[in-house]
Image (spheres, rainbow, N blue to C red):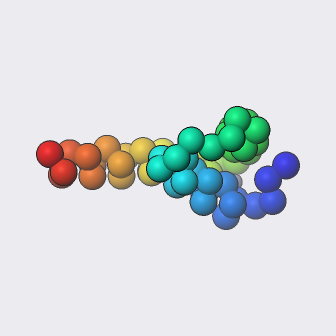
Amino acid sequence: MLKSCHEVHRLVAESYDRQLPWLTRFRVRLHLAACDACTNFKRNMNLLREAMRRIDR
Ligand SMILES: [Zn+2]
């Protein structure tokens, strides 16, 4: 299992820049299913990426 929310945050951020191994993605998903803090983090990341893409254009 993943060690900490900190690691999940790092992996979520990383997953936007490169494809993670399937096992890593699976573990992140498992963690997200059980952890509200990381679910919120991921949602905020999505919003941020979306906002940045709009600014870029
Ligand atoms: Zn977490």
Q: Position of residue 3 (x, y in %)?
A: 81, 59
Camera sees residue 15? yes
Q: Where is residue 56 in the image (x, y as percent from the top left)?
A: 18, 51
Q: Where is residue 36 in the image (x, y as percent from the top left)?
A: 64, 48
Q: Nearer the viewer, residue 37 or 29?
A: 29
Residue most extreme to the bottom: 6
- Taking 15 as reference, is 45 left or right? left
Q: Residue at left 52%, top 47%? A: 18
Quarter placement of the C terminus:
top left
Q: Residue at left 20%, top 45%? A: 54
Q: Which of 15 and 1 is in front in this view?
A: 15
Q: Residue at left 18%, top 51%? A: 55
Task: Give the mark count.
Answer: 0
Q: Which of 53 and 22 is in front in this view?
A: 22
Quarter containing ligand 1? bottom right
Camera sees residue 41? no
- Taking 34 as reference, is 20 left or right? left
For residue 25, above or below residue 41? above
- Taking 44 as reference, is 33 left or right? right
Q: Quadrant of residue 27 in the image?
A: top right
Q: Residue at left 76%, top 38%? A: 23
Q: Quadrant of residue 8 in the image?
A: bottom right
For residue 56, above or below residue 19? below
Residue most extreme to the right: 1
